[in-house]
Amino acid sequence: MKRHRSTVPLLLIALAVAVGATALGARAAAPARPAPAAVGVDDAVDRGARALLVEGRRVFRYDTFGSEAFWGGKLRLHEAIEGQALGGVGQGVSPKAALALGLKVDSAALPAAVVAGIKNGSVSLDKPETTVALLKLNAVLGVTGTFDAGKTHLTGLGIQCALCHSTVDDSFAPGIGRRLDGWPNRDLNVGAIVASAPSLKPYEELLGVDDAAVRGVLKSWGPGRYDAELDQDGKATRPDGKSAATLLPAAFGLAGVNLHTYNGWGSVTYWNAYVAVTQMHGQGNFSDPRLGISIPVGNTMVADVHRTLIKGGIFMYPGTTGKPAGKLRLMYECNPFAFIVEVAGGKATNGVQRILDIQPEHLHQRTPIFIGSENMVQECLSYLKTEERE
Ligand code: HEC
């Protein structure tokens, strides 16, 4: 009996140890011998995270959001950079002048010959030609020039988030070095840069004041400051009479701090959209009833079909119950794109027939459209057919 009593606990202990060992063993072994499916998912998540980071960095550094239409098209800043001698207006902006305005140069974008040239003085930092050459190399942080077919003449200018929210480590020279994404550029004189534009008409019209008044406000900001609300409230000063321009903040993001923007208007996502559309004048949509802002999507078909041509995919503007013919115009929106996309090997249909086969009846006629990669348009048509049957 005594023997029996002692055996049970021993067995239990042995069992417990065995179970524990198995559980621990299983836990310890998990990373070494994962199920094959899990490896695939983890890899896919890692790849996805990496791809998102790369894409985000590209957008932050290089995406102008179509802001060329404003900075080049309306303010004609590119003409001020070139100067009269190169076909623009005024003195032109040399790299020295650009650096003095706080603009920064990405040394990683400079070819060895240019680096050597700057060092030995054969590349002049006093000539607007060099600024144009730097823009051609996409070496100026937050500013991208567009060029004519011959790549000699600046035809426009767009800006990026990196303009105000990044700087360099000065490793090559003051203002020239490796990029520091997210750091605020406290040397950047946004107001003086904008005030160098040949035309400030959009601000004059918006604020109902003359050119001199707009330039006066812009020049009052000073380095490292920008008034991101001037175009909304029209107020150049705070209630205490000081400039309403705000110190440029870092944009690394403050994870976990809700509504952490300086002004507390909204989240970072909200603010990013506000800036990209209302301040950078990028092409996109933004609305906030509190501010009475409603900027509808402009040129979305142009941007979307352009993306579809490069990456593949589909763009559609179907008919709706209220608007059975959709929104887009057959003659000057759908037909030209249908032609381009078909030549590129894609397809364009209104759901029933080829866009290019539609007999026009009047100039402003509308049509639903499904346009893009052949297989996706085909798949879309198969859903439309199923829909009809149901
Ligand atoms: C012309 C300069 C300028 C450009 C270009 C710019 N920003 Fe800003 N950004 C500012 C200023 C100034 C503020 C602070 C505004 C305020 O609170 O009044 C700000 C605020 C922010 C904030 C909030 C930071 C905080 O802690 O409050 C984020 C995030 C941000 N910007 C991201 C972006 C992104 C993304 C882009 C590109 C789509 C962009 N910005 C383009 C000047 C700029």
Image (cartoon, rainbow, N blue to C red):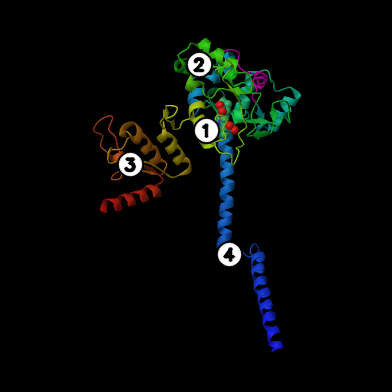
Hey, which residue is sitting farthest bottom in the picture? 1
Nearer-N-terminus badge (3/4): 4
* Above or below 192: residue 276: below
Quadrant assignment for the N terminus: bottom right
Under mark 4, the amino acid is Ala
Hey, which residue is sitting farthest front in the picture? 2
Residue 271: image tag: 1
Q: Which residues are magenta?
A: 89-103
Query: Ligand 1 is located in which of the four quadrants?
Result: top right
Q: Looking at the picture, how far across and down is residue 51, in whole percent?
A: 57, 46
Q: Nearer the viewer, residue 114 or 263?
A: 263
* Label 1 close to label 3 by CB (< 8 Å): no
Under mark 3, the amino acid is Pro
For ligand 1, tell me if the residue under mark 1 lies within 8 Å.
yes
Mark 3 to mark 2 CA distance (whole Å)? 39 Å
For ligand 1, tell me if the residue under mark 2 lies within 8 Å.
no
Nearer-N-terminus badge (1/2): 2
- How many residues crowd around disc 3 within 10 Å: few (fewer than 14), some, or many (20 or more)? some
Where, by quadrant of the figure, is residue 105 drawn? top right
Q: Nearer the viewer, residue 280 or 338?
A: 280
Nearer-N-terminus badge (3/2): 2
Q: Looking at the picture, how far across and down is residue 65, in whole percent?
A: 50, 32
Is 279 placed left or right of 370 in the picture?
A: right
Nearer-N-terminus badge (4/2): 4
**Residue named by callout 2:** 200
Task: Say which element carries label 1.
Answer: helix
